[in-house]
Image (tube, rainbow, N blue to C red):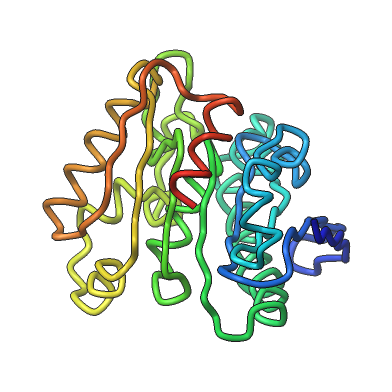
Amino acid sequence: MNREYYRWYSGRLGRDMELLVFGYAGRAVLFFPPRMGRFYDYENWGVVAALSDRINRGELQLFCVDSVDEESFYNGWSHPDARINRHLQYEQYILCEVLPLMNIKKPDNDFEVAGCSMGAYHAANIALKHPHLFNKLVCMSGRYDLTRPVQCFKDLFDGYHSENIYFNMPRQFVANMDDECLLNHIRRLDMLLVIGETDPFRNDNYEFSELLGWKGIRHQFHTWHGYAHAPRSWRKMVQLYL
């Protein structure tokens, strides 16, 4: 399998960032890691190997990026404004540094975006804010409003609200979206939501799916038996949905 490692200094983040690219041709998937995850997690967990046949046939390329979740959403020592601002810097790194690399490797801009767990949040957030950049969105085991506590998962902004937080919570900004041009870009996405029946974020997914329906945004919604919030399930999901 073709495997390429990249590392460069990101001026937008003020530090080195790393990523892995698997494959040499085919649909290019920007693949966000799970909560506080690393760029090599999907390789270590066998998720990449589960797609090896399609990668080797030149049908699929995976761009497995790193996260800065520990410096943004999960940095409990910083003010919520600093947390969301760090996330916005990360978003600019993705848009202005990673996507140009993807464009070099895939000049026709046939881009997709996917993620598991917190990676599903990242995928949904960037695709719904910038739908013209992507053709497909796949969210597995995701959470779409980080301000809503769910069981042991707390509000990641400690009750603090701001415009920047609002515009980075898909369940919040999609609910009030009335720009038909933007909505039409979103409606052309091939969108999939996948969640386990006993996943803590099950209800969040059901409600987000209903919201998308109210906005006329067609999508597939798949419920898996049990928890399904672990690599053993994600290995199967990517084979079906990527």
Instruction: Using the image as rendered, state which of residue 227 and residue 58 is in the foreground.
Output: 58
Residue 135 image-quadrant placement: bottom left
Q: Residue at x 75, y 41 (%)?
A: 43
Residue 222 lies, in percent from the top left, at: 31, 37
Instruction: Using the image as rendered, state which of residue 56 and residue 237 is in the foreground.
Output: 56
Residue 3 in the image: above or below residue 240:
below
Residue 167 lies, in percent from the top left, at: 39, 57
Image check: 166 left or right of 212?
Answer: right
Instruction: Using the image as rendered, state which of residue 103 and residue 68 is in the foreground.
Output: 103
Q: How many marks?
A: 0
Q: Residue at x 64, y 65 (%)?
A: 94
Residue 82 in the image: above or below residue 222:
below
**Quadrant in the picture for the N terminus:** bottom right
Residue 198 lies, in percent from the top left, at: 36, 16
Q: Residue at x 83, y 58 (%)?
A: 3
Instruction: Using the image as rendered, state which of residue 112 and residue 184 is in the foreground.
Output: 112
Residue 122 lies, in percent from the top left, at: 52, 50
Residue 104 image-quadrant placement: bottom right
Residue 135 in the image: above or below residue 161:
below
Residue 58 in the image: above or below residue 47:
below
Q: Residue at x 40, y 35 (%)?
A: 147
Image check: 195 left or right of 56?
Answer: left
Q: Residue furthest bottom?
A: 107
Image check: 141 left or right of 178?
Answer: right
